Image: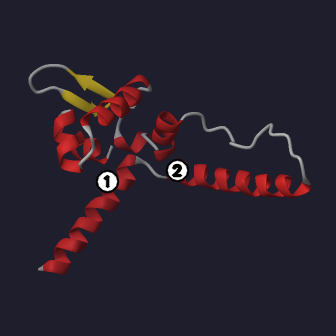
Amino acid sequence: MLELTAHYPHGEPRQIRQIARQHQIPERYLEQLLATLKRSGIVRSQRGAKGGYLLAKEPWKITLFDVVVCLEGSNSSPNRNRHHKSLESLIVDEVWEEAHQMANSILQKYTLKDLGEKLETQRQTNLMYYI
């Protein structure tokens, strides 16, 4: 997603093989991820010799929560409607529920643009460190 975010301003589609090679991701796996993201309207594909995948929306309109829910499934609580055999299991599930809600809150807070900016800042910091 960061690769597509970086190329968004230029309108340059990225091909699966380019992304896979650069980030050492198996092409078949990346194909499956991008197909899922496409069905959810997060990315779109462009046909042709210079085709590939692009973000379907502006990077500041796509949250990490959107991406995670798309790839991992529903955002519903993992312990909801679970029958509790003991008070201990109820307490543990309540803590997990709180952790789940906090994680979702953080994922909703950040967009792909935010991550792209963090990445660029880190690259600049690393570049300055080695000069």
Residue 118: quadrant of the picture: bottom left
Residue that appears at 31% across and 36% down: 30
Image location of residue 67, percent across then percent down: 45, 40
Residue 7: quadrant of the picture: top left
Q: Is residue 53 above or below residue 21?
A: above
| Foreground pick, 96 / 106 | 96
Residue that appears at 43% across and 48% down: 111
Residue that appears at 26% across and 61% down: 120
Q: Secondary structure at mark 1?
A: helix
Upstream in the sequence, badge 2 or badge 1?
2
In the picture, which quadrant includes the N terminus? Answer: top left
Residue 42: quadrant of the picture: top left
Query: What residue is disc 1 on?
Result: 116
Query: What residue is disc 2 on?
Result: 107
Image location of residue 40, percent across then percent down: 44, 26
| Foreground pick, 23 / 13 | 23
> Crowdedness of circle 2 by 10 Å Cα count: few (<14), some, many (20+)?
some
Q: Secondary structure at mark 2?
A: helix
> Crowdedness of circle 1 by 10 Å Cα count: few (<14), some, many (20+)?
some
| Amino acid type at mark 2 | Leu
In the picture, which quadrant includes the C terminus? Answer: bottom left
Residue 14 appears in the picture as rendered: no
